[in-house]
Image (cartoon, helix red, strand yellow):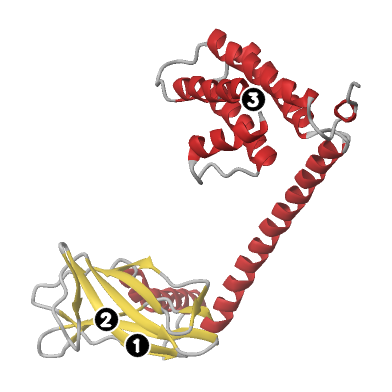
């Protein structure tokens, strides 16, 4: 019996090792060319929510007709809703059992999350076979694992976020409201309480005069009209919606002279002309009206019954 040299035995062993290693990884190398992951689930999903796993597949080279065998899979905490396919313009056609799959088509596995906790696809195998069932090639698709959360917990989280936002906005609104109110109160307190109605309105007119003099504000007629209306409402307890100017004229005649009442009527006519003219406000005209309104209220101030000088009567 001839003894085999030791180096030949060593060489044969190395060859067999690499040959077996090649056979072990060759199917995976070939299979890696037959599919592509388009959309893989990740992150978290709510109970009942649909989970999609999309895979693009291409059939291996074959001389004869081949078909895709019904997928084999094992999953946990999931319900398989169905398997869809997309072929060019057609999308989501149902794939059931063994069906013909063309190159470049996409399989869409649809799952529903069952309950809170971990959910996963443990194993998913696709295989090609001939029409008579003879295997051609099979390959495994990478598994996935996701977290399932309760839909109620998600709703509570959303409500909590919205509530926090509302509280924050509400808190800011209250803060600025109180700050603004405080500022107004301080402004009002700076005016002595002994001031008469006429004095307060004259102060408002003084502020308006600055606006007219500097910019000729387009809303000056409206502001003048508003101050005059507010003055008369407080003076006579008159409501513009009850009888309008006619009712005001009757009330004024009982308190003031006919001349003063006519002047009041003329002021309203001038203001209405400026308010509804539809043209640009004439600064000179509005300033003239302003002076007449100011003088009218100032004259009422000198005879106001609340003023100290009105209590003196010459003998």
Please say if the residues under marks 2 and 1 sit with CB atoms less than 8 Å apart: yes
**Residue 181 - label:** none
First-in-chain label (3 vs 2) = 2
Comparing marks 1 and 3, which lies closer to the viewer?
3
Task: Say what secondary structure mark 2 lies in.
Answer: strand
Q: Residues within 10 Å of mark 1 (few under 14, many from 20)?
A: some
Which residue is rendered at x = 68% and y = 59% of the image? 170
Task: Report whether 248 appears left or right of 168.
Answer: left
Mark 3 or 2: the one toward you:
3
**Residue 223 rendering spot, x and y as whole percentages:** 59, 28
Give the quarter of the figure containing the C terminus. top right
Extreme residue in the front direction: 315
Q: Earlier in the sequence, mark 1 or mark 3?
A: 1
Which element type, helix, strand or loop, lies under badge 3? Answer: loop
Alpha carbon separation for disc pair 2 and 1: 8 Å
Residue 190: x and y, percent? 87, 34
Q: Which residue is mark 3?
A: 257
**Front residue of this view, candidates 50 and 276:** 276
Within the image, what quadrant is residue 79 found in?
Answer: bottom left
Q: Residue at x 44, y 79 (%)?
A: 143
Residue linked to disc 2: 83
Residue 59 makes an appearance in the image: no
Q: Nearer the viewer, residue 3 or 294?
A: 294
Q: CA distance from mark 3 to mark 2?
A: 95 Å
Q: Which residue is mark 1?
A: 80
């Amino acid at each position: 019996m001839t003894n085999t040299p030791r180096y030949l035995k060593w060489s044969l062993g190395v060859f067999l090792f690499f040959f077996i290693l090649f056979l072990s990884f060759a199917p995976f190398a070939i299979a890696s060319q037959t599919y592509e992951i388009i959309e893989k689930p990740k992150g978290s999903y709510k109970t009942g929510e649909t989970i999609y796993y999309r895979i693009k597949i291409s059939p291996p080279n074959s001389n004869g007709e081949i078909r895709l065998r019904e997928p084999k899979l094992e999953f946990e905490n999931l319900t398989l809703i169905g398997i869809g396919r997309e072929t060019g313009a057609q999308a989501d056609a149902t794939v059931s059992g063994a069906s013909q799959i063309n190159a470049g088509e996409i399989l869409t596995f649809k799952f529903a999350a069952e309950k809170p906790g971990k959910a996963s696809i443990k194993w998913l195998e696709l295989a090609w076979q001939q029409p008579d069932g003879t295997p051609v090639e099979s390959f495994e698709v990478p598994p996935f694992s996701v977290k399932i959360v309760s839909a109620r917990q998600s709703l509570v989280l959303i409500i909590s976020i919205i509530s926090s936002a509302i509280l924050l906005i509400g808190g800011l609104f209250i803060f600025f409201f109180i700050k603004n109110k405080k500022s107004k109160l301080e402004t009002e307190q700076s005016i002595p309480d002994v001031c008469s109605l006429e004095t307060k309105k004259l102060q408002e007119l003084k502020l308006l005069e600055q606006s007219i003099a500097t910019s000729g504000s387009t809303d000056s007629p409206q502001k003048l009209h508003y101050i005059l209306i507010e003055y008369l409402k407080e003076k006579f307890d008159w409501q513009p919606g009850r009888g309008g100017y006619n009712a005001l004229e009757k009330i004024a005649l009982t308190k003031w002279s006919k001349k003063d009442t006519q002047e009041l009527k003329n002021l309203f006519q001038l203001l209405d002309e400026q308010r509804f003219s539809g043209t640009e406000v004439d600064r000179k005209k509005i300033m003239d009206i302003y002076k007449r309104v100011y003088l009218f209220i100032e004259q009422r101030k000198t005879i106001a019954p609340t003023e100290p000088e009105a209590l003196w009567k010459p003998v």
